[in-house]
Image (cartoon, grey):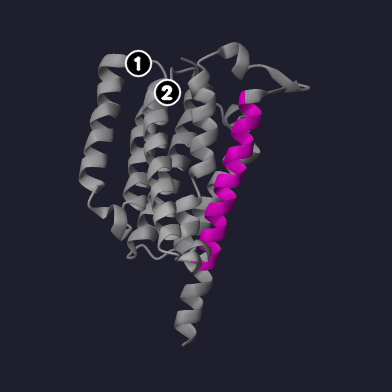
C-alpha cells in the first residue's frame, strides 16, 4: 500500500466525478429532506458520491475496490427500489421486492460472485427496477392518465432507467475484449457508455431538482 497523495487524488478526478459532486450539492441545497422523495434522492446521490470518493482513494492506495462497488450496488439499487415503490400502484410490493433483492445481493456477495465485482446484483436490481417502471408506465397509459408523463414525479422515476440499462448491457457481456474495445482514439466502449449514461442520469437528476426548487419557491411566494 502506498501513501495517499493529494496530487494523485486530484489527477483521478474526471468530469463525471465532478458532475456527481455538483449534482449532490445542487440537491443538498435545493431539496427538502422532510419530503420522502427528496430524502431518498438525496440519499442515492450521497451514496454515489461517497462511492466515487472512496474509489478514488482506493485507486491511489492501490487497494482492491470491487467489494466497495458490490456493496454500493446493494445500497444504491435498494434506494431506487424504495423510490419507485413509493407510488400507490407498487407500494404493496415494496417489502417482498426489497427483501428479495437485498437477500440476493448479500447471498451473491458472500456465496456466488463473492469478492469479484457483483455484476449479477446490479443486473438483477436494474431489471427489477426497469420492469416495475414499464409496468407502472403501462398502467398509467391504460388509465389514459397522459398528463402524468409530464409531471416531475415521473421524471424522477425515469431518471435511472438509461443508467441501469446501459450498465446492465455492459455487465451482461462479461467479456473484457468487448468492454475494452477501442471505439475512438483511446476511448473504450465501456468508458463511452459509462460517460454517456452517467451524463444522462445526472442531467435528469439535476432537471428534477431544478423543477422541484421552482415548485418550492412558487409555493413560498403564495
Is the residue 181 above or below the residue 154 in the image? above
Few, some or many C-alpha atoms within 10 Å of disc 2 (few <14, some 14-19, many ≥20)? many
Q: Earlier in the sequence, mark 2 or mark 1?
A: 1
Q: Is residue 199 magenta?
A: yes
Work out whether residue 213 or residue 204 is closer to the camera in this orientation and state it: 204
Quarter of the figure with residue 195? top right
Query: What percent of the width, then of the height, locates residue 136?
Result: 39, 52
Q: Which residue carries the number 1 mark? A: 113
Q: SS class of the residue under badge 2? A: helix
State how far apart marks 2 and 1 are (Cα). 8 Å
Q: Is residue 165 magenta?
A: no
Is the residue 137 above or below the residue 161 in the image? below
Query: What percent of the width, then of the height, locates residue 24?
Result: 49, 51
Residue that appears at 43% across and 39% down: 50
Q: SS class of the residue under badge 1? A: loop
The boundaries of the magenta stretch are 190-212
Quarter of the figure with residue 196? top right
Q: Which residue carries the number 2 mark? A: 119
Disc 2 + disc 1, Cβ < 8 Å: yes
Query: What percent of the width, then of the height, locates residue 131?
Result: 40, 41
Residue that appears at 56% across and 53% down: 204
Few, some or many C-alpha atoms within 10 Å of disc 1 (few <14, some 14-19, many ≥20)? some
Query: What percent of the width, then of the height, locates residue 220?
Result: 45, 82
Is the stretch drawn in magenta largely helix, strand or loop? Answer: helix
Work out whether residue 129 or residue 55 is closer to the camera in this orientation and state it: 129
Amino acid at each position: 500500500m502506498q501513501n495517499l497523495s493529494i496530487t494523485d487524488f486530484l489527477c483521478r478526478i474526471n468530469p463525471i466525478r465532478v458532475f456527481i459532486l455538483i449534482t449532490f450539492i445542487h440537491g443538498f441545497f435545493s431539496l427538502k429532506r422532510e419530503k420522502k422523495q427528496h430524502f431518498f434522492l438525496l440519499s442515492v446521490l450521497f451514496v454515489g458520491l461517497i462511492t466515487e470518493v472512496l474509489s478514488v482513494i482506493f485507486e491511489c492506495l492501490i487497494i482492491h475496490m470491487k467489494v466497495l462497488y458490490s456493496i454500493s450496488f446493494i445500497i444504491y439499487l435498494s434506494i431506487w427500489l424504495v423510490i419507485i415503490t413509493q407510488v400507490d400502484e407498487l407500494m404493496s410490493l415494496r417489502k417482498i421486492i426489497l427483501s428479495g433483492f437485498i437477500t440476493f445481493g448479500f447471498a451473491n456477495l458472500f456465496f456466488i460472485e463473492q469478492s469479484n465485482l457483483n455484476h449479477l446484483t446490479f443486473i438483477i436490481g436494474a431489471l427489477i427496477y426497469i420492469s416495475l417502471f414499464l409496468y407502472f408506465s403501462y398502467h398509467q397509459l391504460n388509465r389514459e392518465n397522459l398528463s402524468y408523463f409530464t409531471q416531475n414525479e415521473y421524471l424522477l422515476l425515469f431518471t435511472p432507467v438509461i443508467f441501469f440499462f446501459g450498465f446492465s448491457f455492459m455487465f451482461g457481456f462479461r467479456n473484457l475484449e468487448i468492454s475494452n474495445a477501442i471505439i475512438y482514439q483511446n476511448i473504450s466502449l465501456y468508458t463511452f457508455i459509462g460517460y454517456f449514461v452517467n451524463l444522462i442520469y445526472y442531467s435528469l437528476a439535476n432537471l428534477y431538482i431544478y423543477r422541484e426548487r421552482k415548485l418550492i419557491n412558487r409555493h413560498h411566494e403564495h
